[in-house]
Amino acid sequence: MAHIDEDKLTLIYEAMYSHPKIGKTATKVYKNGENGDNDIEVIYHSTSIVTVKNGIVTLNNGGWMSSTTKKRMNQTSRAFDLGFYVYQKNNEWLVTIGDETIPFEEGMRFSIKNDSPLTKI
């Protein structure tokens, strides 16, 4: 899994206690808002579960198909207005992006608007 270059990002949150929008323990949130880049990386334990780089969202679960992983992904989507929702139905992970629901795939990617970098297209 490719990580965003952490040297270029600011660690805006490292969980030791509860974070109101993203969650608690074992979660790190990096964000670079300089020059309108809006790059984001959310790491849960050692897995980069949500990455936004150059307007592309990448989702990973690292093989951990847990309710907490889905919860962190959804909290990230809400916190940064990314426009997706991950859920499970009949033992299958699904992702809703706008009006479309598709099966979750490790490393799946989708675009977000260029003129409003944290809004789903």
Image (cartoon, rainbow, N blue to C red):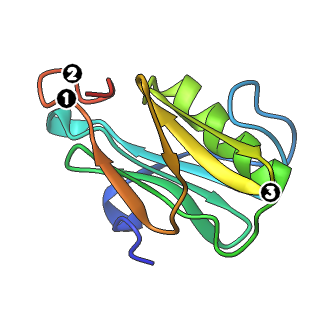
- Name the residue at 76% across, 33% down: 19
List the residue tagged with mark 3: 91
Q: Nearer the viewer, residue 100 or 49?
A: 100
Drawn side of residue 107 relative to residue 64, left or right = left
Q: Secondary structure at mark 3?
A: loop
Looking at the rendered structure, the kind of residue marked 1 is Lys
Residue where numbered disc 1 is placed: 113
Q: Position of residue 102 (x, y in %)?
A: 48, 46
**Position of residue 99 measured from the top left corner of the image (x, y, whole percent):** 42, 23
Tell me the distance, in whole angstroms, between the alpha carbons under discs 2 and 3: 34 Å
Secondary structure state at the residue bearing disc 2:
loop
Q: Residue at x 19, y 29 (%)?
A: 113
Mark positioned earlier in the residue sequence (2 or 3): 3
Q: Quadrant of residue 97?
A: top left
Identify the element where label 1 is drawn.
loop
Q: CA distance from mark 1 to mark 3?
A: 31 Å
Taking the spot 31% from the left edge, 59% from the top edge, the residue there is: 8
